[in-house]
Amino acid sequence: AILKEKYPHKNKCNILELGCGNSSLSYGLYQIGYKQIISIDFSPTVISQMKAKYGESTSISYLCVDFNRMDQFFDENQFDVIIEKAGLDSIAVRNSPDVPKLLFNIYEKMHKVLKVNGIVLSISSKNPVFWKNSVLNKLVDNKMFEIIQIKKTVFTNPKNPTLMNLYFYYLQK
């Protein structure tokens, strides 16, 4: 809903998807009218698969780029929207005292390539207490991002009846 409200002119919205994996998220965005999409992942195998699956029939660009190096591949203020779906969770689950610093560094890179007033949409299974304590409070304190909304939803997978809490984090530069 926030994406449609903030960017009603879909053809003018530049979107970066971090850690696309084999997700159809960017293809779904393409199908509803967003045409300027770059999806990145650190795995060359995944990127090849995604190019084969969707690349020929869409304007989505699939690039092999690590989160930690995105600022070396993209211009400052290039994107209106950055979307990540559980990619940062894969870092957050590491058993290391460096996790908050790693996450903050990635958000710094997002801040660099995001346009002024651009938004980050982050989908995570980690609860808000974790994110606020590890990185969000620091981002707000450093005036890098404003927390627009944190929304909880319960996800059910028809193939697996287990309920899963998902949190949608909306941040604005």
Image: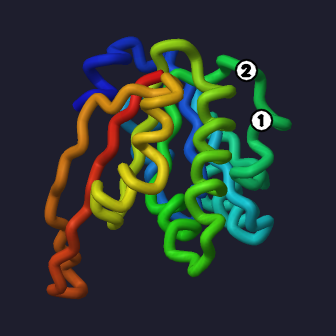
Q: Please state the horizontal and vertical placement of residue 137, each as a whole percent of the image.
A: 41, 41
Q: What is the number of callouts on the image?
A: 2
Query: Residue 103 has which mark?
Result: none
79 to 123, vertically: above or below: above
Q: Residue at x 79, y 65 (%)?
A: 44
What residue is pinned by disc 1? 71
Dot 2 lies on which element? loop
Residue 34 seen in render: no
Q: Is residue 91 left or right of residue 72?
A: left
26 to 33, vertically: above or below: below
135 to 7, vertically: above or below: below
Which kind of residue does numbered mark 1 sit on?
Asp
Foreground pick, 59 / 100: 100
62 to 91, vertically: above or below: above
What residue is pinned by disc 2? 76
Q: Do the residues labelled 1 and 2 touch (CB within 8 Å)?
A: yes
Which kind of residue does numbered mark 2 sit on?
Glu
Q: Please state the horizontal and vertical placement of residue 17, each as a whole percent of the image.
A: 56, 44
Q: Please state the horizontal and vertical placement of residue 47, each as a whole percent of the image.
A: 72, 60
